[in-house]
Image: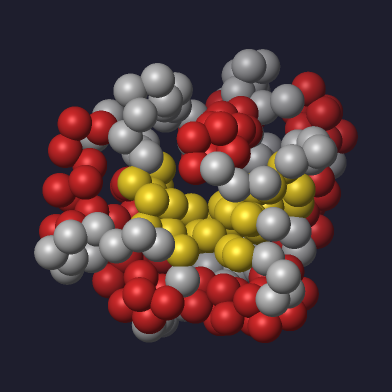
Amino acid sequence: MKIAILGGSFDPPHLGHILIAEQIIEYAGVDQVWLMPNFTTETHHEVFQKHLSPPEDRMSMTKLLETDQIKASDFEIRHNKKSLTIVTLKELSQKHPEHVFYWITGSDKLETFHLYDDWQDIIWNYHLIIFPREHMLWHLEERVKESLELQTIPENVIVLTNTDLILSNISSTAIRKRVKKRMPIKYLVTPEVEEYILKHKLYTNE
């Protein structure tokens, strides 16, 4: 199978994640998308650091988004607590040689992609899917070449520029702020995730 991995904090997972996953399946020709919460963002790069809810809560909420083609994976929580992309790709490829793994990255992450450990190894030896965030469609391929230091885009890098793509600026940060202010989050998360947040009193003390 062709499996695309969408990593992140998923604090909380929201409808924007579902939109990305569904469209990756539609336009990138993959069989499944795995939503993969990270264990922590404590890295040696300050730009990636932020406080997160317990991994158990974030994983439980992410599982509420599962469908036949969208799966929640606790791989990084269990096996790669530093959430190094290159380690995840290497270990998954070794553990599941029958699958081809793709790493999904948003266009908003292009500016910091060179801070990833072994970032050039990821580009040349694995598969990448670049998904536009909000706008940028018209010059996304040029941005990709500039940020990843490429003369041309190799076959293993898929840049989604389909004008039918539905883009969203929904963010976990905005949802947490709304919860703290006791504002509604309906239409931003699924009803199941909203119920989980309320039941476990997440984000009320941020």
Q: Nearer the viewer, residue 37 or 90?
A: 90
Residue at horizontal 33%, vertical 23%? 163
> In the image, 67: left or right of 144?
right
> In the image, 154: left or right of 146?
right
Look at the picture and state if 109 lies above or below 94. Answer: above
Residue at horizontal 34%, vertical 46%? 159
Quadrant of the rendering where the N terminus is positioned: bottom right
Quadrant of the rendering where the C terminus is positioned: top right
Q: Nearer the viewer, residue 11 or 7?
A: 7
Can residue 149 be seen in this snapshot?
yes
Can residue 52 be seen in this snapshot?
no
> In the image, 46: left or right of 101?
left
Residue at horizontal 65%, vertical 40%? 13
Q: Position of residue 132 (x, y in %)?
A: 35, 38
Q: Position of residue 176 (x, y in %)?
A: 58, 37
Q: Position of residue 39 (x, y in %)?
A: 66, 68
Q: Nearer the viewer, residue 170 or 155?
A: 155
Q: Quadrant of residue 198?
A: top right
> In the image, 127: left or right of 62?
left
